[in-house]
């Protein structure tokens, strides 16, 4: 089977069984979620901290679930999933003063993923209907990526 189908050659794709423009807000959000997962994957592959790599891999999988929900799958992000992210933020956060610039490649890659995460949040927020807890999860995720970046930089 070939990877290309030619179905999208005229700027349309299929979403929830109907053709939509690739510029549709939901399609743009799905692309941004995909970009976020890729940015996290790049950071994950460069981290030496084993526990963080495992956490980031689970987050990549969670982003696939979120993309499915945005695309119309009847699933949801549970409050417990957000609580887990909050616990990780508390575990890794090291208080800093002033504007922080990354000191390590790990910190820089996690900060890059954080900025993509913020853009993802903005994109999702533009949707007419946002499934419950998705914005909250993405918001906490950007905080976690920041906490991990600072942690990596300070534990160098």
Image (cartoon, rainbow, N blue to C red):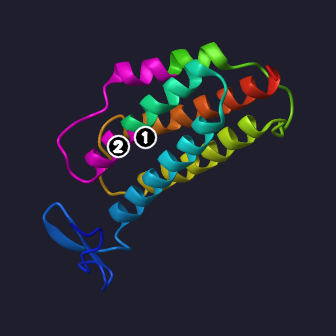
**In this image, 98 relative to 48: left or right?**
right
Which circle, 2 or 1, is nearer the viewer?
2
The residue positioned 34% from the left and 70% from the top of the image is: 24
Note whether 21 is above or below 66 in the view shown: below
Q: Nearer the viewer, residue 50 or 24?
A: 50
Residue 88 marker:
none
Question: Within 10 angstroms of label 2, few (less than 14), some, or many (20 or more) residues?
Answer: some
As drawn, the residue found furthest toward the bottom would be 10
Query: How far apart are the alpha carbons under marks 2 and 1?
Result: 15 Å
Q: Secondary structure at mark 1?
A: helix
- Image coordinates for residue 149, horizontal then vertical, percent: 70, 32
- Image coordinates for residue 57, horizontal then vertical, percent: 46, 32
As drawn, the residue found furthest toward the front would be 1
> Which secondary structure is most common in the magenta stretch?
helix
- Image coordinates for residue 10, horizontal then vertical, percent: 30, 86
Which residue is tagged 2? 64
Q: Nearer the viewer, residue 156 or 147?
A: 156
Q: Give the quarter of the image for residue 126.
A: bottom left
Residue 135 marker:
1
- Contact between marks 2 and 1 (CB within 8 A): the answer is no
Q: Is residue 26 magenta?
A: no
In the rendered image, the quadrant that contains the N terminus is: bottom left
The residue positioned 31% from the left and 40% from the top of the image is: 65
Which region shows up in magenta? 63-85
The residue positioned 66% from the left and 38% from the top of the image is: 110
Q: Is residue 81 magenta?
A: yes
Q: Give the quarter of the image for residue 113.
A: top right
Question: In this figure, what is the number of numbered marks?
Answer: 2
């Amino acid at each position: 089977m070939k990877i290309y189908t030619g179905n999208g050659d005229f700027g349309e794709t299929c979403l929830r069984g109907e053709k939509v423009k690739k510029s549709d807000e939901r399609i743009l959000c799905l692309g941004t979620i995909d970009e976020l997962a890729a940015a996290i994957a790049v950071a994950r592959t460069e981290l030496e901290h084993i526990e963080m790599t495992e956490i980031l891999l689970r987050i990549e999988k969670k982003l696939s679930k979120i993309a499915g929900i945005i695309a119309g799958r009847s699933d949801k992000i549970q409050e417990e999933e957000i609580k887990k992210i909050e616990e990780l933020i508390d575990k890794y956060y090291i208080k800093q003063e002033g504007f922080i610039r990354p000191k390590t490649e790990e910190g820089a890659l996690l900060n890059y993923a954080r900025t993509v995460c913020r853009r993802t949040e903005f994109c999702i927020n533009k949707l007419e209907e946002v499934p419950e807890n998705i914005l909250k999860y993405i918001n906490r995720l950007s905080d976690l990526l920041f906490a991990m970046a600072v942690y990596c930089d300070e534990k160098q």
